[in-house]
């Protein structure tokens, strides 16, 4: 699924990475616990999270994730947004809940990341 | 540390600086990319560095993360000044943590840090003196096959 499709399915506001919408998203990993993401999310995954702190962006950066969807209308911290823009990491915002986001992405064919263990 | 490294660089980390927690791991990732290392090696080291950095931010007063580059491996040592770990075997088990709610609100403190570091590295050692601090040493072999997990 292309990132622009994610934007349209979830009615996202694009906070960072509006020139990267052709990006192909391989799979999705949803969590608020960044250690879970670091332990189990494969590279290239879309991160769906309710965590708005800068650690959410650092996690995506170190784990080579493709993009981030911030759920439930939470605005990212100023540092988080600045860092996402600096690292050219797409950061999307939706008012939908975590459950609604996962459900819609699944209905549109995006698969969950397979846990590595 | 019985051999001379090709390159070494140290990065200070401040305890309780949640706003900047993750910046050192990201800077080191940039350094590793400049060295032209395989993507898998960079990813595993970056995950280990990020968990180690967040451990310092959450628990210690300050620390130095040092990266040493050798022809066949990257070694990292994180030396902190802080409370230390009273029971390392306990802390190494997934889910075991003394984190506060503030730490958990940042997406960390679930007792996965040290196990995540060990899982992503080829060599791993932790030593601690209660009341003095903790030293982590880990390494990733740059010529090894990608490690599962």
Image (cartoon, rainbow, N blue to C red):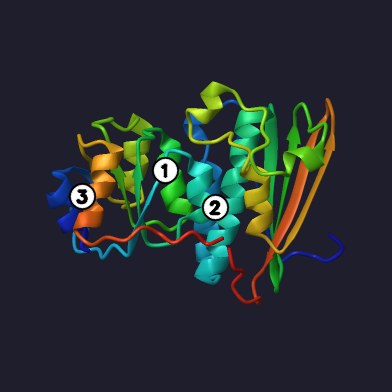
Determine the residue positioned at 69% across, 29% down.
B60
Of mark 3 and mark 1, the one earlier in the sequence is 1
Q: Secondary structure at mark 2?
A: helix
**Where, quadrant-wise, is the N terminus of chain A in this rendering?**
bottom left
Q: What residue did someone put label 3 on? A: A104
Which quarter of the figure is the C terminus of chain A placed in?
Answer: bottom right
User: How dense is the environment of label 3, judged by Cα within 10 Å: few (below 14), some, or many (20 and up)?
Assistant: some
Give the numbered dot on residue B109.
Answer: none
Which residue is drawn at the image coordinates 48% and 53% (left, top)? A62
Q: Which residue occupies the foreground of this view, B94 or A73? A: B94
Q: CA distance from mark 3 to mark 1?
A: 16 Å
**What whole-number distance in Å separates the C-alpha atoms at marks 2 and 1?**
11 Å
Q: Is residue A13 above or below residue A3?
A: above
Label 2 – label 3 distance at C-alpha? 25 Å
Asked if one can make out residue B43 in the rendered structure from this viewpoint, the answer is yes
Residue wearing tag 1: A31
């Amino acid at each position: 699924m292309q990132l622009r499709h994610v934007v349209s399915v979830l009615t996202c506001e694009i906070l960072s990475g509006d020139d990267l919408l052709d990006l192909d998203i391989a799979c999705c990993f949803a969590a608020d616990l960044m250690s879970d993401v670091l332990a189990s999310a494969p590279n290239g995954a879309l991160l769906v999270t309710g965590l708005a702190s800068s650690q959410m962006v650092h996690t995506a950066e170190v784990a080579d994730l493709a993009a981030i969807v911030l759920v439930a209308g939470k605005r990212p911290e100023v540092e988080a947004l600045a860092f996402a823009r600096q690292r050219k990491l797409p950061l999307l915002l939706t008012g939908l809940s975590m459950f609604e986001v996962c459900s819609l992405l699944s209905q549109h064919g995006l698969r969950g990341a397979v846990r590595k263990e | 540390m019985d051999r001379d490294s090709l390159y070494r660089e140290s990065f200070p980390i401040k305890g309780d600086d949640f706003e900047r927690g993750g910046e050192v791991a990201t800077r080191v990732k940039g350094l590793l990319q400049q060295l032209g290392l395989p993507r898998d090696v960079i990813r595993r080291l970056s995950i280990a560095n990020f968990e180690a950095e967040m451990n310092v931010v959450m628990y210690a007063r300050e620390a130095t993360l040092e990266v040493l580059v050798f022809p066949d491996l990257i070694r990292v040592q994180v030396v902190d000044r802080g409370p230390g770990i009273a029971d390392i075997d306990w802390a190494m088990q997934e889910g075991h943590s003394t984190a506060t709610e503030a730490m958990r609100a940042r997406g960390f403190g679930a007792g996965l840090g040290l196990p995540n570091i060990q899982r992503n590295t080829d060599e791993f050692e932790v030593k601690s003196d209660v009341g003095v601090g903790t030293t982590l040493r880990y390494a990733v072999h740059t010529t090894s096959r990608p490690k599962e997990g």
